[in-house]
């Protein structure tokens, strides 16, 4: 795992042996960011990374010019891992929270330009999580905000907010936008 572009380009993540992570491969990550470039300018955006795991995707956003990053994960080992990287790279605009993802998005009041979520593929309440994000006032305040969900390819979201689904092997990304009123 490494950072592909930007300020931290070439940074290689330390070895991580967590049983609860599924790091996005460099090839899939590059494809994701190529796709996102058609929907959002990353320079100066605010990012929420939910189910952050190693922080791989969130750090790629920061490297590419995001103004701030909030990463959320509920595993202590993942939190310690991200904080070690944050300290090593001396990153001040990265806040890391230990929290249940669903509780975090239900209680959130901050507005983000982009929400990225990479939940476990077998998360039992995944559709509830997606609906909470899509129905939240903080997501819908900004009609240009974007919600990106990484998930197993077998899942389909038939929702009016869906603007794109891309598949890479058994990994899919679904992009959601607020509905303009």
Image (spheres, grey):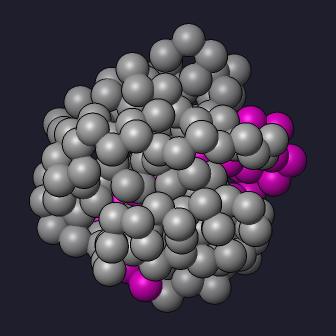
Quarter assignment of residue 131: bottom right
Residue extending farthest right: 124
- Asked if residue 81 can be seen in this view, the reply is yes
Q: Is residue 23 left or right of residue 35?
A: right
Viewer-nearest residue: 65 or 50 = 65
Residue at 49%, 18% (x, y): give it. 167
The vertical placement of 140 against 59, above or below, is below
Corner quadrant of residue 145: bottom left
Q: Residue 128's image quarter?
A: bottom right
Q: In screen coordinates, is 37 left or right of 98?
A: left
Residue 21 or residue 91, whichever sits in front: 91
Estimate the x, y position of residue 26 in percent, counting from the top left: 41, 26
Position in image of residue 179 (x %, y %): 37, 58
**Residue 157 seen:** no
Q: Residue at x 54, y 70 (%)?
A: 83
Coordinates of residue 48 in the picture (x, y in percent): 45, 66
Segment colored magenta: 110-131
Above or below — where is 16 with respect to 180? Answer: above
Residue 129 locus on image (x, y percent): 69, 59
Q: Residue at x 28, y 59 (%)?
A: 62
In the visual, does 77 lie left or right of 70? Answer: right
Vertically, is 169 above or below 78?
above
- Seen at 86% across and 47% down, the residue is 124
If the image is split into quadrants, where does the C terminus sit? bottom left
């Amino acid at each position: 795992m490494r950072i592909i572009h930007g300020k931290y380009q070439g940074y290689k993540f330390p070895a991580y042996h967590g049983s609860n992570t599924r790091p996005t491969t460099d090839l899939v990550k590059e494809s994701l960011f190529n796709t996102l470039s058609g929907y959002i300018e990353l320079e100066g955006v605010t990012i929420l990374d939910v189910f952050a795991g190693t922080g791989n995707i969130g750090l790629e956003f920061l490297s590419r010019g995001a103004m701030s990053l909030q990463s959320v994960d509920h595993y202590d080992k993942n939190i310690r891992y991200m904080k070690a990287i944050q300290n090593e790279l001396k990153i001040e605009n990265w806040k890391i929270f230990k929290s249940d993802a669903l509780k975090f998005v239900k209680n959130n009041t901050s507005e983000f330009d982009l929400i990225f979520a990479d939940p476990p593929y077998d998360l039992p309440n995944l559709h509830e999580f997606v609906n909470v994000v899509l129905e939240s006032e903080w997501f819908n305040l900004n009609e240009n905000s974007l919600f990106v969900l990484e998930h197993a390819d077998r899942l389909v979201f038939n929702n009016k907010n869906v603007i794109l689904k891309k598949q890479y092997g058994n990994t899919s990304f679904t992009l959601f936008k607020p509905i303009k009123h």
